[in-house]
Amino acid sequence: MRSYVALRMVLHDRSSTTGALLGVIAIVFLVGQQLSILFGLLNYMSVLVDHSGADAWITSENVRNSDASGLISGRYADRVMGLDDVEWAEPMLISNGLFRTKDGSYESVRVVGTKRPRLAGGAWEFFAADQDAMLDRESVTVDRLDLEKLGNPRVGDITEIGGQQVRIGAITNGARGFQGTLVFASLDKVSDIARTPPGRYSAILVRFNESADKQAALERLRAILPERSVHSAAGLSKLTRTYYFTTTGIGGSFGFSTVIAVLIGVVIISLTMYTSVLGRVKDFAVMRAIGARKLDIALVVISEAMIIAGIGVFIGFVLLSVLLNATNGSSIPSFLPDEVPALLAIGTILISLMGSLIALRVAVKAEPASVFH
Amino acid sequence: MLLLKNIAKDFSDGREKRRVLFPTSLECRAGELTVLSGPSGSGKTTLLSIIGLVLTPSEGQMFIDDLEVTALSDVEAATIRLKRYGFVFQQAMLVEGLTILDNVMLSFAIQGEKPPADSFEKASALLKTLGLEGTAQMQPRLLSGGMKQRASIARALIKDPPILLCDEPTSALDAESGQVVMETLKRIAIEENRVVIVVSHDARVFPFADRLIQLESGIITSDTRESNQEEKEIVHASH
């Protein structure tokens, strides 16, 4: 029944309820939007690892992220294929190149070379044409989101990357990396573009058999390749994200923005709930006089905060969903892992409660004797 | 029965103590309407606040039947107020946002108690008895001052309290509304056998009193029950 009293008060005090609601919505929307961009960028950071289809990556030693590995011999693939646990082992070559656009200008791209016919580590989703187009040595992909930047090339167009003639074989959908535009090509073509020595690659991708104990298989790989770094795909993904998160200032920047968004929300909630309670001090004093304990008054105020938080979280998530749907498939990186909305909702409710503390203090101090004339 | 023994109250402004109520003994019985009257600053509201357990006396003892209620904790006092008291304030003090029915039922809501099954019926019956039929779902702001005051009486009575305390219940009302309210309080005192104490400086209230206590500067200066008792003793002696 105290929550019923709280609900009636919330519905009656429209202006202060609206103000507090705006505070809650601000927290959910702004923090959610920041987090979606952050997680979207994190996805970009490890995109090649996450979509490689491999269980393990063999790289040069002391690698700090998947984009910066020294060249290693392709013979490691042959060595590894001899193990019972291994289904396949394929080389991958990553390098930079200059893409020549139609108007004669150049754009820097990351070229990713994968071995035919498996094309392990290559493009995973296509907008135009398909993976078969990549079986052609001269074919490259460009991404749908980079078409404008690259001068709107079409499938079949001939251009150059790093002075090497290439043909646009396919257009990928959402293949974007943190270091820039991703262009997938054959291993040989990338080797030509990067002018790397034959048989030298950035990494060897390894897939274990379905029935293999993946951790044990990983340990066996490490045992036979002590001179190389052997990472699980998940481990390399995490290493890469951590590297970019901590060295580029992204963590600090997003952390600061998130804190500001929370502070704005807390201030709005505190001020509006404080104002609302000030207007109700006489009511709380009457309730105290007729037999409410301080705890009962506190529960009414807390119930008000929870009702406002619940409604605000709902509206905030509706708005956030609209934003995320609108940006889905656009060039804005946006992604929210499954667990984040629940954590954001809980966090917002706790912050709302925190914002109501000042109001709570005023309410419980309402003196019952003050209602006697 | 309500019994006060040598109840006194001091207030301190930080530098000195000021006595606003001198040792006062009082016994209030069920079935009578007692009016506490006096000029502003006479201590009548202080006395009512002490009786209503919202102020703790500086001296003395207070009993409700055999239960001593002098120095209760905040929680104990609130619980006893909820169970044994009904309050009618000068301004009705209905909570805006709650309907009239919600306001009447507020005593059940405030400590999270589940209302008994017949409480809604009882509340509706109370409103009807007080001439407020049809107002249950209305907001307080839509009622006249007299109607609000009667609704606050319904709120005070919903839990059948043995003690009803009224602080200037007619001062914000016109003569007609005030008359209705006092008739209602008188009926409640006598027909429902409750202790009803009314603080008022309004002389129009006096004719309704079974007992009129006058205070001045924190001291009871006259008590019609004691006067009547003295007269009875004189008559008895003369016979």
Image (tube, rainbow, N blue to C red):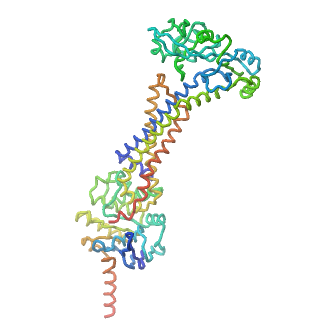
Residue A262: % across, % down: 46, 41
- Between B44 and B147, the one lying in front of the other is B44
The total of numbered circles placed on residues is 0
Residue, far left: B175
- Between A115 and A190, the one lying in front of the other is A190
The quarter of the displayed image where residue B163 is located: bottom left
Q: Residue at x 68, y 12 (%)?
A: A199
Q: Is residue B74 left or right of residue A75?
A: left
The quarter of the displayed image where residue A76 is located: top right
Q: Is residue B141 left or right of residue A79?
A: left
Residue B68: % across, % down: 48, 74
Residue, far bottom: B238
Q: Is any part of residue B116 visible from this angle?
A: no
Question: Where the C terminus of chain A falls, by quadrant?
Answer: bottom left
Q: Is any part of residue B43 visible from this angle?
A: yes
Q: Please determine whether, in this image, residue A28 is positioned above or below residue A124.
A: below
- Between A67 and B222, the one lying in front of the other is A67
Q: Residue at x 44, y 36 (%)?
A: A316
Q: Is residue B161 left or right of residue B92?
A: right
Q: Please determine whether, in this image, residue A223 is positioned above or below residue A372.
A: above
Q: Is residue A336 left or right of residue A88?
A: left
Residue A162: % across, % down: 55, 10
Residue A239: % across, % down: 62, 29
